[in-house]
Structure formats: C-alpha cells, structure tokens
Image (spheres, helix red, strand yellow):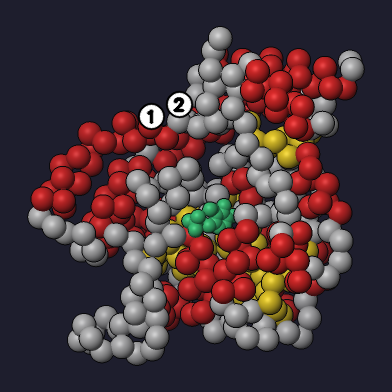
Amino acid sequence: MLKVPFTDLGAMARETWPDIEIDFLDAVRNARYVGGAPVEQFEQDFARYCGTSHAVGVANGTDALQLTLQALEVGAGDEVIVPSNTFIATAAAVVRAGAVPVFVDVDPDSLLLTAEIVEAAVTPRTRAVMVVHLYGNMPDMDAIGAVTARAGIHLVEDAAQAHGAEWQGRRAGSFGIAGCFSFYPGKNLGAFGDAGAVVTSDAGLATRVRSLANHGRSSGAAHYEHLFVGTNSRLDTLQAIALSGKLARNEEWTEARIALATGYRDRLAGTAARLTTVAAPARHVYHLMVVRVPDRERVQKLLADREVQTGVHYPVPCHQQPPLMRYARTPLPVCERAAGEQLSLPLFPHMTTEQLDHVCAALTDALNEVTGR
Ligand SMILES: Cc1ncc(COP(=O)(O)O)c(C=O)c1O
C-alpha cells in the first residue's frame, strides 16, 4: 500500500545540501561555529523576505517571543492577550517574561483571533497581544492593528508557523512591533536543529533583542562588558548556512504547499471534514493542513490502517494545560471544541498527487464509516 508520511524533511535537506555543502564543511573545518558572515547574511536576507528592516537570529522561536517581550519591558503585573488555540510556547514565553497570559477564544471558522476578541479582552493592565498566525494563516491584520493602536498596546506576531504568509500582500512579521519566527526543523523554513529569529523595523528594539540574546553585550563594547543581564540565545553559524540554502527555495516550496492545499480543498468538498476559512486578502502558507472531523481518534486510526500518518495540533488548549490552568478565567468554547476535532493531514512540498489522492480517498472512506453515510 502507498505510504504517506506526515512530512518529509529528508527530501528538503537532500535538495538543499548540494548548494550549502561547501559553506557548511568550510565552517566546520575552519571552526567557525558562532556568528560571522553567514549569520549576518541570513539575517539580512530574512529581513528582506519579511519586508522588515532588521532580523535578529536567536536560538529558537520560544526565545524569540520571550526576548521580544523582555526587550519591550513587558513583565511583572502586565497582561498579554494570547489565543488559547496555539502551541504552548506562545503562552509560556509570556509567563517566562514574568507577565500574565490572558487567554481568549478564536473565530470558529478560521480558528484565529479577531479584532473584536482582542478588543473585548483589553484592560488597563494590557501591554501586548500575541497574534498567532496559526497553521500559516493570517487574521485581519488591519482590523487588529486598529484595535492595538487605539488601545496603545504592542502587537507582537507569533509567526512561528507562517514564513512567507501575507495579509494584503504584506508579509507576516511586518505588521507588529515585532514578528517572532521558529526555524524548528519541521517548520516551513526549518534549520538542521533549533533556531529562530525576531524581525522588526524598530532599530532600537532590534538592538535590545540582539543584546539580550548575547549576554547583554553591546556591539561596540569590549567582549566582557555587559549592559545588563541577558541570556545566550544566538543563532549559530551552521544553522544560518542551512537556513540560507532553504530560504532560497522557500517560495517554490510554499507554492507547492498551496497547490496541495487547493487539491485537498477540492477533493474534500462535500465530505464531513470541516476546513478552516481563509480570508480573501490572506496568503495561507499551509504549515499545517488542519481539518475538523467527527470521532477524530477513530478517523485517525482508520487513516493509520491505510498508511496515512496524521497529527493533532493541538489536542489540549493552553488554558487547560496543567501549568497554565491558573490563568484560565472563563471557558473558551471554540478552542475547547476544536481541540477535540482538529486533525492535521500530511502536507509537504515533495508530496505527490498520488499521495494526495490516497489521503483524500482514505479520509473520505473513514468519514463515511464514522458518520454511517
Ligand atoms: C505557534 C508557535 N509558537 C511558538 C513556537 C516555538 O518555537 P520553537 O519550537 O522554535 O521554540 C512554535 C513551534 O514550535 C509554534 O508553532
């Protein structure tokens, strides 16, 4: 039987390797492991890709979020609005920065934040909102930007799943005071290990994040002079080389993802699978192809029986995770219901039409079986 893996990171690495092999081996042989020209080059290229003036490479996406909040001096006593339907890191970064996550629900069709939801959650203690471009999709950034401007709070984008996503032709990461990216290997733009970046057009913020990520050093000062207590969260040289090789392919791979997602939408129309909506001005880059289905565990098992690997993003909303439950204020019915229904289908740039057909046929059969159609 045809096997369909959830993703195929090896295919992406093999395609990239010939272009980066010389630089990668050169860095290894010459012991250039931290900083240097490859990091600077990737930062410049990634900032250009996002449409911002600066990109600061950091160790991972969670640090990108936490360092951004710290650089904005969001901390003790401050509230940060966070959608509960996200990976725990969005909320964990708020807690680790010393602030209080205020969990809110999401739109039932897109499963993203809306301007109305953000507006209703603002209090005199609110300092920021984390807008999560979940699955690679973007909410109405004009409306949300208008709310944050009116309320005088920071708009921080958690763009960990949204490299190259757009709203009205403008890239994810360029709307807020900062955009935070993860380059975890499984992300659309993934390194050969952990990595992340903060993009911004605020030069002061970029400098503060860079310093915080490098032990509070300042660029002009001597190596052992520190402005404040920071941490070690640098993007390393080998990851920067891998990322540059992959960034050059990211548009082609993103278009392949979008074409596959269109194929999914066409083939699953009329089935019991509920697809998330995409607003007309948005470019959804399909980090994840998420559908909501009845009797998810059984559907997942029926798909596994036909060699189709799936995932669940995410089975427990943040406000119901034990370490975060104390921040929960009210039930969040859309997030809670979605957590029990969401199913992520295979989607990766090298997926074939044959594999797409196989997944859709297997899913259609599984849905017919669980709904008794
Ligand atoms: C929405 C979201 N935010 C934050 C993160 C954290 O990124 P990282 O794993 O690189 O720390 C991830 C990915 O893991 C994510 O999907």
> In the orientation shown, which residue stands out farthest toward the top?
1
Quarter holding the N terminus is: top right
* Residue 343 spot, x, y in % from top left: 70, 36
Asked if residue 172 can be seen in this view, the reply is no
Left or right: 131 in relation to 27: right
Asked if residue 2 can be seen in this view, the reply is yes
Q: Which sits in the foreground, 231 or 136? A: 231
**Ligand 1 near label 1 (Cβ, under 8 Å)?**
no
Tag 1: amino acid: Ala
Category of crowding for the residue at label 2, using alpha-carbon neighbours closer than 10 angstroms: few (below 14), some (14–19), many (at least 20): some
Q: Residue at x 45, y 70 (%)?
A: 201
Q: Which residue is mark 2?
A: 350
Name the quadrant where ligand 1 sits: bottom right
Callout 2–callout 1 Cβ contact below 8 Å: yes
* Residue 290 spot, x, y in % from top left: 68, 37
Q: Residue at x 33, y 75 (%)?
A: 214
* Residue 146 spot, x, y in % from top left: 71, 70
Category of crowding for the residue at label 1, using alpha-carbon neighbours closer than 10 angstroms: few (below 14), some (14–19), many (at least 20): few
Left or right: 336 in relation to 43: right
Q: Which residue is mark 1?
A: 11
Say the numbered circle drawn on residue 249: none
> In the orientation shown, which residue stands out farthest toward the right?
372
Tag 2: amino acid: His
Using the image, determine if residue 134 lies above or below residue 147. above
Left or right: 76 in relation to 341: left
Secondary structure beneath disc 1? helix
Q: Which sits in the foreground, 231 or 189? A: 231
Secondary structure beneath disc 2? loop
Using the image, determine if residue 52 lies above or below residue 134. below
